[in-house]
Amino acid sequence: MLLHIIDVALLIVYTVIITLATYIIAAHRKYFHERFRTGVVSAFMLAMLFFFGRL
């Protein structure tokens, strides 16, 4: 029973983290688009942002 509660809690936490990371990227879409064009932000940097947002 306790493991089931932990599984559900982790699933909720991971869902919130993924949602927030996606929101951050979407909210700053104009900024990232501008930086992509100038070459300052790469896809690797966005992947790192998404990864670190999940920690």
Image: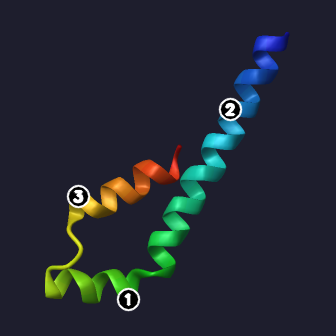
Which residue appears at 50% of the width and 63% of the height? 22
Residue that protrudes farthest toward the right in the picture: 1
Badge 2 marks a residue whose secondary structure is helix
Residue type (three-letter) at the residue carrying disc 1: Lys
Residue type (three-letter) at the residue carrying disc 3: Phe
Badge 1 marks a residue whose secondary structure is helix
When asked about the image quadrant of residue 20, the answer is bottom right
- Residue 10 badge: 2
Q: Check if mark 3's residue and mark 1's residue have beta carbons within 8 Å.
A: no
Q: Residue 46 at x, y = what percent?
A: 32, 63
- Estimate the spatial distance between the alpha carbons at disc 2 and disc 3, rounded to whole Å: 26 Å
Residue type (three-letter) at the residue carrying disc 2: Leu
- Estimate the spatial distance between the alpha carbons at disc 1 and disc 2, rounded to whole Å: 32 Å
Q: Earlier in the sequence, mark 1 or mark 2?
A: 2
| Left or right of residue 13, residue 52 in this image | left
Instruction: Report crowding for label 3: few under 14, some 14 to 19, many 20 or more residues within 10 A (C-alpha).
Output: few
- Residue 44 badge: 3
Q: Earlier in the sequence, mark 3 or mark 1?
A: 1
Instruction: Report crowding for label 2: few under 14, some 14 to 19, many 20 or more residues within 10 A (C-alpha).
Output: few
**Tag nearer the camera, 2 or 3:** 3
| Left or right of residue 38, residue 28 in this image | right
